[in-house]
Each structure stands twice: as C-alpha cells, then as structure tokens.
Amino acid sequence: MSKRELLRQKRKAQKRRKLITVLIILLATAALFTAAIMLPRILMNRIKFSGAEGFTIGDQDAPVTVVQFSSYSCGFCKQYSEREEPAFIANYVDTGKVYFRYVSIPSNDPASQLAAEASYCAADQDGFFEYRGFLYEGFSSPDGYSVSNLVNYANLAGLDTEEFQTCLDSNTYARAFMGDIQYAQSVGVTYTPSFLVNGQLVNANELVPTIDVLLGQ
C-alpha cells in the first residue's frame, strides 16, 4: 500500500474516532439532561394527595375526622409517614371514610421552627403534603432546614419557588406554629406523633383500630 493510501486510511480512522467521540459526548449530555429533569420527580414523595387543601385532605363530610400532631424533627413521625401513612391514606382518606388534618408541632430548635414556617408557605400553594416528605428527609442532614434547602424542597415538590421564597422571606408565618402548639396542649398532646380521632386522643398503634370501631368495622 502506498504512502498516500496509508495517509488516506489514517485520516479516515481519525475522522471515525472524532465522530464516535462527538456521539459519546452528545449521548452523555442527553443522559445528564434527562437525569436533571427526571431526578426531582423520582425524589418527590410518590404519594399523590388528590383533593388536598392546605393542611387537610379528604372529604369534609367523612364520618371520622383525624388530626395528626407531628414534628419534622421527630424520628417516629418520619417513620410513620413513610411506613404506615400511605396505606392509611389509601384505605381511609381516599375512600371517603376519614377527613385528615396535619398539625405541626416543632421543637424549640430554630431550624425546626423554620421548617414549620416553610410548611405553611407550601400549604399556601396546596402543596403541603408533597413538601412535607422533603422536610422529613431534611431532618437527617445537619443543614437540612437551611433556607436554601427549604427553597430547593419547594422546587422538588413542584411549587412556585419565587412565591415560596417571598413567603419565607416575609416571615408571614414566623409564629404561626404557636397556635398549633397551643391547640396540641389544649387536647392533651404530650408526644408525637399523636392523633385526635373524633375528639379521642390516641397513639399511632391505636389509630386504625379506633377508626374501625367508629366505622363499625
């Protein structure tokens, strides 16, 4: 093979390598772009709360009303939310048997109180239940309740982050949780999670049996 032919073959090989490299870069870029879009959706709480309004969900005319008292800095509350609540929502709230309300009881820690304040801003957009899942996740991180993370959770939950940021910056709900704490004290709540079932205070293990008795099941 002549030198000219060898040179031609070499140039062809170089072009093929360049083309393959460009294709790899394009595919990698496309994969990263797809991940950037899909990852927030994957991370979002997979429970979809239809008919949610503020801190409540379900049929207001349901025969049983359940009020849950919880804290975002409570490990047991996080565990209940992840392990037991999905079935409770599906079997009792979505079926029209229970009208459900969530009441936030933050600890004395300023970060926990800021998280409670943020949950009110999420509730303004009827995105509280989706947002709450990220607050529970943030509890395990040292800076989980930093302002930047709280805004990021709003983005992941599909909220209008500009509106959320404005709400948080304005301190609209800076002390709103005080009313929740007073309400909890008035009904005798001493630990979280606790549940008020048609006026009867019960713990997590007693919740479903108490409801079943009221429903005659």
Image (cartoon, rainbow, N blue to C red):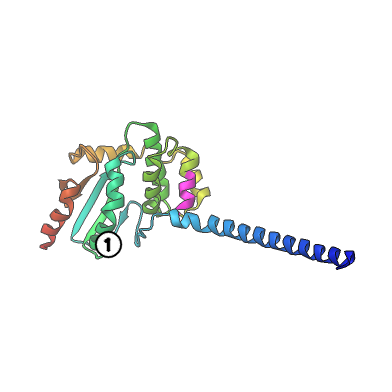
- Image quadrant where residue 36 sits: bottom right
Is residue 96 visible in the rendered image? The answer is yes
What residue appears at the point 26 percent right and 60 percent down from the top-left corner?
93
Q: Which residues are magenta?
A: 151-157
Location of residue 50 with respect to 204 vertically, above or below: below
In the rendering, at what x and y percent does residue 8 appear? 84, 66
| Residue corresponding to mark 1 | 90
Secondary element under disc 1, as helix, strand or loop, is helix
In the rendering, at what x and y percent does residue 196 appear? 19, 48
What residue appears at the point 47 percent right and 53 percent down from the top-left corner?
159
What residue appears at the point 81 percent right and 62 percent down from the top-left corner?
10
Location of residue 36 with respect to 168 vertically, above or below: below
- Image quadrant where residue 183 sits: top left
Is residue 59 visible in the rendered image? The answer is no
Look at the image and say whether residue 212 sits in the magenta stretch. Answer: no
Magenta span dominant secondary structure = helix
Look at the image and say whether residue 152 sits in the magenta stretch. Answer: yes
Q: Nearer the viewer, residue 172 or 196?
A: 196
